[in-house]
């Protein structure tokens, strides 16, 4: 997941971080620990590397000092806002091959949902991911791709084209995404509606992270002033 996944999907993003969604059970965490040891990676910042913090939805951060990955930050999470549990996202994963090595990557719809954060940089990337998928597959799309585009496209001009091509699918999609009712009207109204939708998602993410940020602040304070 994260920037490296965006690169593999063709929405280029330079990143020196590697972000992973993981299954946070004891056997898998043992394997993760062995992999981190092989990378000479140590936990940095807060929270500490404990399963309870992963289950809260916090990311645990590591820094590698292996000569082949020196300075690379590794972030792991097991729970994300708006994203299904690990078992479901693992079933839907995409596999990319790099020099005969399979790289398991979060499926594009799941990656897009994970990108709906309060961070400014995530929304242009989200748009590039969905637009790129549309342009690559628009000639002969599957029903699943059409449904995905209606749910996630943010470029008003492309939504209008999609609505013109697939009016029956549009009517079904309006129930889940009401702004699509504007898809046959002026493009300015649709653009304004997608911006309002983005702001609502940013606010939902802010509310989701509010208690998690308080926990991070508590851990930082405890780290600075142990024993208080």
Image (cartoon, rainbow, N blue to C red):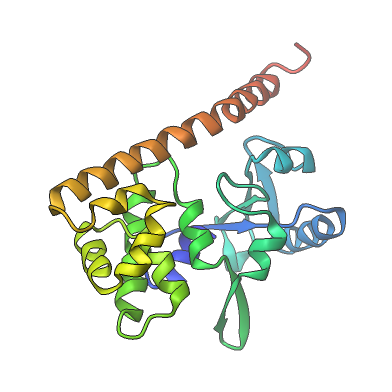
Residue 129 x, y percent position in the rendering:
37, 64
The image position of residue 157, as x and y in percent, is 19, 62
The answer to whether 14 appears left or right of 77 in the picture is: left
60 or 183, nearer to the observer: 183
- Res 12 seen here: no
Return the residue found at the far right.
27
Please state which of residues 102 and 126 is positioned toward the viewer in this rendering: 126
Q: Residue at x 44, y 59 (%)?
A: 15
Residue in view at x 43 percent, y 67 percent = 147
Answer with left or right where residue 12 lies relative to residue 34. left
Quarter of the view holding residue 90: bottom right
Is 159 located above or below residue 10 in the figure?
above
To which quarter of the image does residue 197 belong?
A: top left
Quarter that holds the N terminus? bottom right
Q: Which residue lies at the image location 78% right of the left edge and 14% below the top edge?
A: 227
Question: Which quarter of the figure has residue 213?
Answer: top right
The answer to whether residue 222 shows anywhere in this view is yes
């Amino acid at each position: 997941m994260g920037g490296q996944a965006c690169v593999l999907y063709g929405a280029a993003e330079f990143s020196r971080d590697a972000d992973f969604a993981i299954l946070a059970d004891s056997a898998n965490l043992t394997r993760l620990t062995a992999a981190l040891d092989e990378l000479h990676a140590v936990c940095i910042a807060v929270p500490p590397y404990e399963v309870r913090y992963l289950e809260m939805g916090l990311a645990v951060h590591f820094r590698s000092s292996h000569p082949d990955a020196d300075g690379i930050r590794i972030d792991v999470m097991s729970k994300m806002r708006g994203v299904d549990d690990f078992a479901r996202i693992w079933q839907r994963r995409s596999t990319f091959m790099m020099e005969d090595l399979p790289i398991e990557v979060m499926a594009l719809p799941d990656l897009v949902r994970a990108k709906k954060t309060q961070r400014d940089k995530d929304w242009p990337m989200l748009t590039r991911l969905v637009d790129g998928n549309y342009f690559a597959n628009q000639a002969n799309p599957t029903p699943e791709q059409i449904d995905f585009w209606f749910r996630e496209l943010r470029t008003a001009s492309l939504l209008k084209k999609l609505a013109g091509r697939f009016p029956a699918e549009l009517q079904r999609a309006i129930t889940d995404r009401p702004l699509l009712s504007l898809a046959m009207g002026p493009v300015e109204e649709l653009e304004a509606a997608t911006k309002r939708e983005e702001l609502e998602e940013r606010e939902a993410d802010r509310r989701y992270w509010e208690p998690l940020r308080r926990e991070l602040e508590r851990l930082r304070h405890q780290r600075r002033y142990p024993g208080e």
